[in-house]
Structures are given as C-alpha cells and as structure tokens.
Image (cartoon, rainbow, N blue to C red):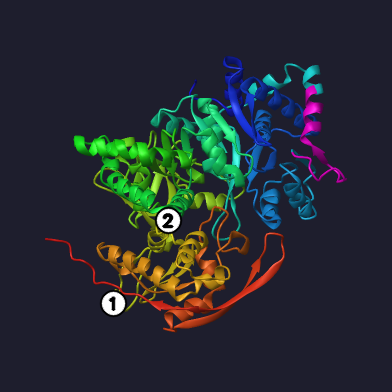
Amino acid sequence: MGTHTTFPQLLLQHASQRPQAAAMREKEYGIWQSLSWGDLAVMVEHLAAGLHQAGLQRGDHMVVVGANRPRLYATMLAVQSLGAVPIPLYQDAASPECVFPINNAEVRFAFAEDQEQVDKLLEVRDQCPQLQYIYFDDPRGLRNYDQPGLAAVDELLAAGKAFAGLHPAFFKSEVGKIVHSDVAAMFFTSGTTGNPKGVVHTHDSLLNRARAGAEFDKLTSAEEVLAYMPPAWIGQNIFSYAQWLSCGYVVNCPESSATATIDLKEIGPTYYFAPPRVFEGMLTSVMIRMEDAGRIKRNMFHYFMNVAKRVGPALMDGLEVSGADRALYALGNVFVYGPLRNTLGLSRVRVAYTAGEAIGPDLFTFYRSIGINLKQLYGSTETAVFVCLQPDNQARADTVGIPCEGVEIKVAENGEILVKSPGLLKEYYKNPAATAEVLTADGWYHTSDAGFIDSHGHLKIIDRVKDVGRLKGGAFNDAMFAPKYVENKLKFFQHIKEVVAYGDGREKVCVLINIDFDAVGNWAERRNLPYAGYTDLAQKPQVYDLIKECVEKVNADLSEDALLAGSQISRFLVLHKELDADDGELTRTNKVRRGFIAEKYQVLVDALYEGKTSQFIETVVKFEDGRTGSVSATLRIEDTKTLAPVKAAA
C-alpha cells in the first residue's frame, strides 16, 4: 500500500481486493454477526450519501458517542469520506462534559448509539443551539421521542441508498478529493486541569504511526482484535481503527462492557491491548479463585508459578535454559499456564501491549512468565500513540522501550522528554497559545514527562515534569519527590486500587489510599471478618495492617534507589469512598486529579501532616442515576517505617 493514503481509500482497497473477508464482528443477543469489507463499504457509501444530503460539508465536525459498534466505525468513515472530521466522545461522560467539545468544534451533527446517549445530547441542546441533527443506532426506548432533527441511522441509510442509486459515482469521487494531509479526526484530551483540548490529527499522522506499529510487530490481516475500550481514547482508535484499516484484520465488538471478559475468551485475540488496570483486574480475579480452590490444586498452582517466575521470562526472551527446567516448564504449561491463559482469554495472543500508566514489575513478570508476550509502549493523544515500543526479547517492567521508526527523542535540561515524529498533532483546535506551548518552531513536541534514556537505549519515565517536586526540611531535605512513581509502586499490590501521594515542598511524603474492594473483600471473607460495605471495610484495623505491610515494602524498595529514597511514605490513610470520575476525582481515562483531590480533601491532607491519628470527613457523592448522597466516616491515620537510603557499593 502506498505510504500516503487516507482512511476511506484504505476501506475501498480492502473492499475491492477482498470483499468477502470479515472486517468486523459484533455480538448481538449472544451470537457473533460478521460484516464483510464489501458490505462495510456499501454501508459507508450510504451513510456518506445520507449525511451529504442532510448538509454535512467538508471541514465540518461530527460527534460520535457510543461503544465500539460497526455502525459507529462506519459513521466515522462516512464522515471522513466527505472531508469532514469525526470527534469521538467518551460514552460514560456526564452530559455537561459534552458541552465544551460540541461548542468548541461548532458541531451540528451527532451519532448517538442508544437512548442513554440521545438523552445526554438532548439535555445539553439548549446550551448547544447549533446541534441540529442527532442520529441514533439502537432504537430501543426512543419510539415516542419527537425532537427536531432526531432520526434513526436506518432512515439515514435508506435516504443515502436512494441518493447513491441516482448518483453512483458520487461516493468514489468524494473519496478521491481527500488527501493524506487533510484533517482526519479530533480527540479531546481529558486534561487533569481546565477545559479539554481538541487534538487535531491528519490521515497521515494517524496512519503513519499505525503502520510503524504494525511493521514493528509484524501485524497482518490475520490478526483478531477485541475493541472494548472507549473509541474516544486514542489508544483504542489506533488499535481498532487506524491499524485495522492499515492491516485489514478483524475487529470484534463485544456485546457490552459486562460481557467483555466472556467475549474475550470466545474470540481469543492475537493482538491485544489493555491498560495496566485491566491486567491487574485479571490477575486479582485469578488469585481470588486460587485462594478459594482446594489444597492440592492450590499447592500445584503455587509450585508451578514459582517455576514460571524462575524460568518463564528467560524462555520468553529466548535465553539459555537448562533441559530440566525446560521439562518442568513444559509440565507446568500442561497443568497450569495453558489452562490459565485459556481462562484469561489470552491463549492465542501473539502481542499484548499495556500503556497509559506504569505496570508493576510483578504483574509484568507474571504475564510474561506464563507465556504471554506482554510489552509496554509509550505515547499520547498528541503523538498518535507510538513513540517507543519494546522489542519482543527486550521487554522490561521499568522501561517503555526504544524509539520506534521515524521518532527522535531528546531530554531537556529539566529532564523533560522531547519528541520529533511524523505522528505529532497538527495543532490544538482553536488554541494557538496551547499549541505553541507544546510544539517548538523546529518540530519538537514537549511531552511534559520527565525521564531519561538508559544505557541500553530504552526510555525510562519517572513522572510528569510538573509533578516532580522536592521535599523541604526533615530527614530527606531537598530529596527528589516523584508522586506518580510512588503511587504506581503501591498500586502494584492487588489489595490497592488507587493512591494519591503528596510531599512537594513538605518534609515528608503522605498518601491517601483506595483499597480494591473485590480483593480486600475476598481477603476479609476468608478470615471471617464481617463488614457492611466499602466504608466499613476500609477502616478495619486488620485492613490497615494489610495496607501498612504494602506501604513498608514500597519504602524498603525506594530506600535502595539513591535518586528516589526521599519519596518513602511516612504516613497514610485509607479513604472512606472510592475515587470516581463522576465525582471529578479521576479523569475519564482514570488518571488521578491530584490538585482537585488536595482541595476536596484538604482536611485529610492537613490531618496527615499535623500528626493527627484520626480525622472525621463527610463527602457528597454522585450516584449513577444522577442522585446525590453523602458518605461520612472517621478515618484512621497510620505512621509507617522509613529507611535510610542504601549506599551504593563503591
């Protein structure tokens, strides 16, 4: 395929070369339905003709909001075929979060998957008066809606089909007008502060990175991919849209987020992507099931897992392993690793990636040791994902890989990573000041991440530049403090779900912790420890002992790192509620909004630093149905042991 192409041109190429091959599968009512490349191209043609008739013009923006569905993808392709720009929005965003993107991009057209998304858009319509047309895919519950401009995608397809019948050359001539440097999509970043910014990408920037990733991992049209993350997230867009059209593999859409794990097992993807949180959740559920298993089964599992830990990573990296160990590992593969990969739905995975957050070394090693080729990558919305990738035999938990094709990296004096790449954003939409802040005149992108290139040429990320601080006073005066690094180290324990660390400009590090309710709940039940919900369980003395043990293990680990020994944790508390994006505490991509949390829970942060042993707090929470309530509790505060930095051997 030519190096410069566009998304609709790639669609037409697949449709003409392999019209009968499956492009997508969707699970409906428990049955997988296939859509061929030929049928997909016809659907896109009819949608494009319908949208053209409705008045969608070159350069216009159209919002698409919903889960991964063939019609959502077809709509994005139809919009691009007319030279217009699709903007995927997070399907779990609350309606007020949609107002800024819709108004900022002057959006007149929207695709909404179902009644929930239609309601959301109708709710903000008086704040977005230009939003004229809303097309819905799933008609359930919408029969009696009588709103101007609200119509079913089926109607749009019927109108488009009639138009295409009268103008058979229309679609191909429209696709022919689009060039690779045209804007292809816009993604709103869920900024941890202020309004989100519209990241503008061209066909070139997205497809160039999709190809670089595909060539690096030798992806072909034979791959099977499960599309279960939000389409608004650029990672999902690259893996199941840009690379899908680039390689021509099959994208599978689960029935719902609730069935994603079952669907994963049925599909058995060969190319898989998930943030660390998903891999953590999988491992936690395996461990919970193992704790509940009989003694013989449990002993066998632990015995072979020790073998895997010792031998697996070396086998994965193609290193020398003794014959006896190979035989033991092969036995473990029959009794434990094979069935385990099968249970996880990862038995066919050739390449698995994780990104977005750091992944715990134990978690990383666990998957690689049981024969899953799990690797890390580094990138962002602004870089069209692929900046660094790990080669198959050089996957390490503490790095994010080597610069991939076309990428240059340099480290600024303040430790910030700068990137030059064909995948860089064109601009932030209608925000030249913000664009100038991140893009230099000679094409370097400021990532805002602090890190360094190690002796093997791999990139290591420490934290966000703005978050790297210094301790003032106390035992570790002027020591470096990297909050995210500390938070991630704690999140590597299965009993801890979220962490927020403070310490910049203070004399010690203190953290707020969320327990993992499933893992700690199971742990409590096995100890016959009764509890009445999250708040009660979080404050149990036994749970505090469990968490304290995790914190002190992290401190021991940090004390061995001369650079970060000062980031050891002196005090902690377990929060009375789970941090939630609906309450503004996390972004939609589940990143902690540290500043917002510091303000909201100032009384708790003060109590940690004032040496108190407990603190009462009452918090307003928002329920899924929009109601609000409040949660209150008196939280314990615990001191932990910190260690003197370990001196490196001379």
Q: Does residue 397 show up? A: no
Q: Nearer the viewer, residue 265 or 229?
A: 265
Residue 475 marker: 1
Residue 291 marker: 2
State which region is magenta.
138-161
- The quadrant in which the C terminus is found is bottom left
Q: Is residue 57 above or below residue 378?
A: above
Whichever of labels 2 and 1 marks the residue nearer the N terminus, that label is 2
Is residue 446 rendered to the left or right of residue 393? right
Residue at (75% x, 34% y) in the render: 56
Q: Residue 328, position in %: x, y? A: 26, 39
Is residue 31 rendered to the left or right of residue 120? left
Q: Is residue 11 above or below residue 641?
A: above
Mark 1, secondary structure of its residue = loop
**Amino acid of disc 2:** Glu
Is residue 514 rendered to the left or right of residue 132? left
Q: Residues within 10 Å of mark 1 (few under 14, many from 20)?
A: few
Q: Residue 296, position in %: x, y? A: 36, 50
**Amino acid of disc 1:** Ala
Q: Residue 40, position in %: x, y? A: 66, 25
Q: Residue 508, position in %: x, y? A: 36, 75
Q: Residues within 10 Å of mark 2 (few under 14, many from 20)?
A: some
User: Which mark lies nearer to you, 2 or 1?
Assistant: 2
Q: Is residue 396 above or below residue 206?
A: below
Residue at (71% x, 46% y) in the render: 106
Residue 430: in magenta span: no
Q: For the residues marked 2 and 1, what is the alpha-carbon distance in whole angstroms? A: 41 Å
